[in-house]
């Protein structure tokens, strides 16, 4: 499961002008064993949090104990215009958890940054993403 939050949270006027899912980024998961993961992007999100809006996103199934690498790919929300380079993929070494980030070309620009501790931040809005259970 992936835990994340938007800081500040979503504002009512943003949802009214941009639609209820303007913030809806997606993820896909794969591992070195070729395990089939669902890409339904299920989870929960507290859209009422104005100071911080917390959410979870399921990875699409359990990660086998014998897997040695987990890759999580991120796709930004439709219509989002990046303002700087962003982390589009995390490779997580298992079982230790060492994280390697893959970034977009700086000209493609977006606001995500990996923090080096298994989390990512969205500098535009203070989004923090962390892998966990």
Image: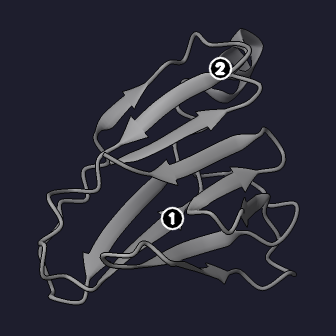
| Residue that numbered label 1 is attached to | 74
Q: Nearer the viewer, residue 6 or 10?
A: 6
First reached walking from the N terminus: tag 2 or tag 1? 2
Residue 69, relative to residue 54: is it above or below?
A: below
Which residue: 57% across, 49% down? 129
Q: Viewed as shown, does residue 54 lie left or right of 121?
A: left
Q: Viewed as shown, does residue 57 lie left or right of 114?
A: left
Q: Viewed as shown, does residue 132 lie left or right of 18?
A: left
* Picture quadrant of residue 56: top left
Quadrant that contains the C terminus: top left
Disc 2 to disc 1: CB gap under 8 Å: no
* Picture quadrant of residue 124: top right
Which residue: 30% across, 75% down? 95
How far apart are the two marked residues, 2 and 1, measured between alpha carbons?
Answer: 22 Å
Q: Nearer the viewer, residue 123 or 17?
A: 123
Report x, y in % for residue 105.
Answer: 78, 85
Callout 1 crowding tier (Cα within 10 Å): few <14, some 14–19, many ≥20: some
The residue at the far front in this view is 96
Callout 2 crowding tier (Cα within 10 Å): few <14, some 14–19, many ≥20: some
In what element is the residue under mark 2? helix
Report the mark closest to the observer, 2 or 1.
Answer: 1
Q: How is the image coloured?
A: one colour
Which residue: 53% across, 32% down? 21
Residue 89, relative to residue 123: is it above or below?
A: below
Q: Which mark is residue 15?
A: 2
Report x, y in % for residue 81.
Answer: 78, 56
In what element is the residue under mark 1? strand
* Picture quadrant of residue 48: top right
Which residue: 26% across, 86% down? 68
Report x, y in % for residue 53.
Answer: 60, 23
Q: Nearer the viewer, residue 48 or 133?
A: 133
């Amino acid at each position: 499961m992936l835990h994340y939050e938007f800081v500040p949270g979503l504002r009512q006027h943003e949802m009214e002008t941009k639609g209820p899912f303007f913030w809806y980024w997606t993820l896909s998961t794969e591992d070195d064993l070729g395990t089939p993961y669902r890409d339904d992007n299920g989870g929960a999100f507290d859209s009422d949090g104005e100071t911080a809006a917390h959410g979870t996103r399921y990875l699409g199934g359990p990660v086998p104990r014998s897997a040695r690498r987990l890759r999580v790919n991120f796709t930004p929300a439709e219509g989002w215009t990046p303002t700087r380079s962003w982390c589009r993929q995390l490779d997580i070494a298992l079982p230790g958890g060492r994280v390697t980030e893959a970034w977009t070309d700086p000209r493609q620009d977006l606001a995500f940054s990996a923090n080096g501790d298994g989390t990512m931040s969205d500098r535009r809005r203070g989004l923090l993403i962390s892998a966990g259970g």
